[in-house]
Amino acid sequence: MRILQDVPGRSLHLQETRSLGAQFGCLLLFLAPFWIAPLIPLGLMLSGAGDLSSQRGSIAGLLMFFVFWYGIVGVTTAVILYSSRRPLRMTLDRDAGEWTVEERGAFGLMPRVLSVPLLELRELHLSTSRARGVTPDVGLGLQAKLRRDDGREENFRLVVDGLDKREEVMDFAFRCASIAGLRGYVIARNDPREFEITLGREVAGLEPVPPIERPCNYAMDQVSGLVELPKEVIPEFDPKSYRSPFQVQRWEPGHEVRLFKPFQAAAVGCMSAFLLPFAGYGAYATLTSQHTRSGDPIGNALVGVLWVGVPLIILGLCIWFSLPVLSVIDWASRTVVVARTRRTRSIPFDELTSVESRGVRTYHSGGKNQSSYNTYKVQTWIHAHGGAEVITETEDMREDPSTPYRCGLPLGVDLATALGLEHRYTDYK
């Protein structure tokens, strides 16, 4: 949405100026076959029917199918149209005393007009909702939540042209707050990927909203001169919400942290069920092949390697990566111990240099009946003079970079703080 009018402290008007015809045209092409295709059998039946009375049973059955089919297609279409709904214009006017957001779905359907009187507005919550992708500070959108005095909430999403930095998110929030009469704010989250700010009518316990001096121009990175990005604000690590193959057996930074990854029996079992039939068939083929009967050792070896050796090698690698891992950070002995099946490394605190939270994106090409996709996870690395070690990692999340990030980043930050080390975050690549 483009900012058409910006009078600091008085009014703010945004409007969608881009044409959405191409996106809606693709949606129409997708939905049309589901609505049109079932009518073809009915047309053929009616065109070839001489006496409709003899076709009543078939026509009645077909009509019942239509009711069932179009019920499903209709609900699906309504959900798609609802999810396609986006703001067309937003007006925040102090003189009119209202915050108005007009939304429309594809083809102008599913309209909604959200109107909140400014006198009833108690709180505004803005958070970045990054579009799919892995580049920092690009593709930022805003998730807005308006809370009334009676507790009711109104939610909507918007993307402001040129708004791609956290300083600009703060500036936009302050502009809205100065018009709506919200006088205090608190930063709930401020980290390399996400930003959340809450603004309220009361100032007690909050930072005062600074005055807005001039209109903004986000395309030219121009914000109010009084807007300064605060230091990072990251929630504390919560072991109960940590989604990982590692179990948090003890979490007491400053005393002891113990992370244990048990043997991944489920992964090995699934891989065995998939590979062992190939190995069994390969053993049978090797023993009964003409190369074996003719005494050809080279041909027999090739058959054995292809059908037996390769599945067993893959299974062996799966077992190797599924073996238990124990990571212990002990402040009493001032050591970090990473124990694997055949290797244990002990690192004194004096050799530690930093803690890294590293985002890992893995591309999967998919198969014959499956499209390609990405999985995301965040690994926690301990860097030392003798090399780095992975002490834990989150689960792989399919097409979800946010959940591993929210799980893994607080862990790395809290560990770095307790160890007195620098923390850095490496984004997904």
Image (tube, grey):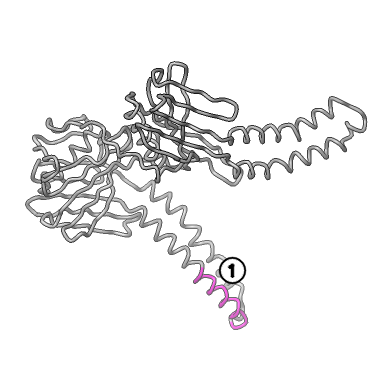
Identify the residue at image location x=51%, y=23%.
Answer: 345
Residue extending farthest to the front is 332
Q: Residues within 10 Å of mark 1 (few under 14, many from 20)?
A: few
Residue at numbered disc 1: 44
- Image side of residue 204 versus residue 325, left or right: left
How many numbered discs? Answer: 1
Q: Nearer the viewer, residue 78 or 42?
A: 78
- Image side of residue 230 versus residue 292, left or right: left
Q: Nearer the viewer, residue 19 or 2?
A: 2
- Image side of residue 146 versus residue 243, left or right: left
Residue extending farthest to the bottom is 53
Residue extending farthest to the top is 385
* Residue numbers of the magenta segment: 53-68
Q: Position of residue 321 (x, y in %)?
A: 58, 33
- Is 63 colored magenta in this rendering? yes
Above or below — where is 154 with respect to 327? below
- Is 97 colored magenta in this rendering? no
Q: Position of residue 171 (x, y in %)?
A: 18, 37
Q: Secondary structure at mark 1?
A: helix
Q: Nearer the viewer, residue 165 or 263?
A: 263
Residue extending farthest to the right is 294
Image quadrant where one finds the C terminus: top left
Question: Label 1 amino acid?
Answer: Leu
Q: Position of residue 80 (x, y in %)?
A: 40, 56
